[in-house]
Image: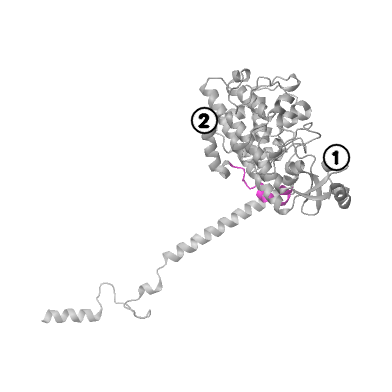
Amino acid sequence: MKRTRSTAAGLVLCLLCGSSLISCAQAFKVRAHEAVSMTTLSGLSTSANQALKKLLNGKDLADVAGWAHRVSDKYPDTARLHFMSQPTCPSKPLRTDDIILDKSFCEVKGNCLLEALTYFFFHLVDPDQNKVEQTNPDVITTTNFVFPHDIKTTDADAVKYIINLVGDMHQPLHMGSADDDYGRRAVVQYSDGEQMRLTTLYNFLEAGLVDKTVKQRQYFWFSGWTHVNSVKGAYDSEKSLFATNKEKMFSEWAKENRAVLCNEVYPHVRKTGKDARAAANALGSDAVDEYAKAVLDGSSDVPLFEIDAAAEFALFQVLKKRILLAGARVAIVMNYILQVRESKDLGKLRQGSGVADVVDSIDPPLAVENMSMVYLKNFLTNFAIFLVILLFFVYISRFYSTPPAHALQRGGSSPTTKLPPTGAPAGGRRVEMECMKDS
């Protein structure tokens, strides 16, 4: 079976990659986007799943999980579609209801994450909305949106972009600020389980934390956790909210992501007061990755941040929840799009791509040590649990099906006392009956 269809194929976040600001848009590495897509597959209606499979020439959503970021590798100007720069996080916690999104990045750069997502959504459900000014402040106007490089996108392109962009909207650093370049100028120290290493905050969330989890907790990563039932309460309520608010929900999700970044990510990244270059010299070149080296080479004064074990655990819980929510919401959006197209008689989604020179999937198999042993051990673990439960029920059923020994005794007599034959009353009772007859 394909790696993309493995029991819960790894997937976690596609964060940003690259040089300054947005020059390389590898948000959420493929494992993260795959995890989002696997969650989505569990929430798609049968008809939506079939329609999307046909649109994608037999592929499923996990197969095209990283497609939009490969487009950015080929066409760098599309990288900015994956981000939406916001001001630096305030010192006090943010309430989602109080957040006002800064849309200046979208206006200055011409394109941004929220604008691109809204544009592709309108493209599929109501194309005329891309030609009019939006009066609702919660819906961004897309009249100025032009796909870079003069590429004409198709229905299939729009679907693949929505899959990728909703995932990016749940990676907190995609709503980061230019002050630390979305976390790419923040050098962090963490343990890979064997030694201390240096990377950037961006790369730690994008790849370092996920790769460490896959390496050390393979049985969890491939255990089937990527399912909408993992966030069933949120999934059920979000379906109702999206049916009512539609594209307005995109702004709500962006605000939520912004709040997660400021309230749940940055507070766990501790500034040590030390210099990152001194730490790099102490650890040695092999312990410093290319992203941290680029930051150190470009600046003379680089502060060192630390992510300890407690912070790492907290950040993984954040990322896990963001992946599950992203997958559930992609399913909701896709189910809605297919339903609307059918009700409005908009016709079937059209195949083809304006960027046909970018393949859907080029990823090598997951680099997991001895995958056959992973699946075998998972099977044996589940089988052992099944046997224990089975033996327990067999024991309980035998215990209650055998009468207790004291049930055979009469009137407190010894267990060795013989009982009268069936139908014959006890001796004392028989004499009493005969006496009654004589009288």
Q: Is residue 224 found inside the magenta-colored segment of the image?
A: yes
Q: Quadrant of residue 224?
A: top right
Q: Earlier in the sequence, mark 2 or mark 1?
A: 2
Marking on residue 244: 2
- Front in this rendered view, residue 326 or 105: 105
Measuring from the top left, give residue 338's x and y in whole percent.
56, 27
User: Which residue was labeled with disc 1?
Assistant: 294
Colouring chosen for the image of the structure? one colour
Q: Secondary structure at mark 1?
A: helix
- The kind of residue tagged 2 is Thr
Mark 2, other Cα within 10 Å: few <14 / some 14–19 / many ≥20: few
Q: Is residue 231 visible?
A: yes
Estimate the x, y position of residue 313 in percent, counting from the top left. Answer: 69, 51
- Asked if residue 418 lies left or right of residue 326, the reply is left
User: Residue at 58% of width from left, 29% of height from top?
Assistant: 248
Image: magenta residue range: 212-227
Magenta highlight on residue 222? yes
Q: In the image, what residue occupies the spot 55% across and 39% down?
A: 235
Residue 2: image location, x then y, percent: 68, 39
Q: How many marks?
A: 2
Question: In which quadrant will I find the N terminus?
Answer: top right
* Front-most of residues 102 and 75: 102
Q: Is residue 30 above or below residue 421?
A: above
Identify which amino acid the numbered label 1 is placed on: Ala
Quadrant of the image containing the C terminus: bottom left
Q: Residue 178 location, x and y as percent?
A: 76, 35
Say which residue appears at 31% left-offset and 78% top-offset: 411
Q: Quadrant of residue 336?
A: top right
Q: CA distance from mark 2 to mark 1?
A: 46 Å
Q: SS of the residue at dot 2? A: helix
Nearest the eye: 40 or 411: 40
Q: Does 17 appear above or below 280?
A: above
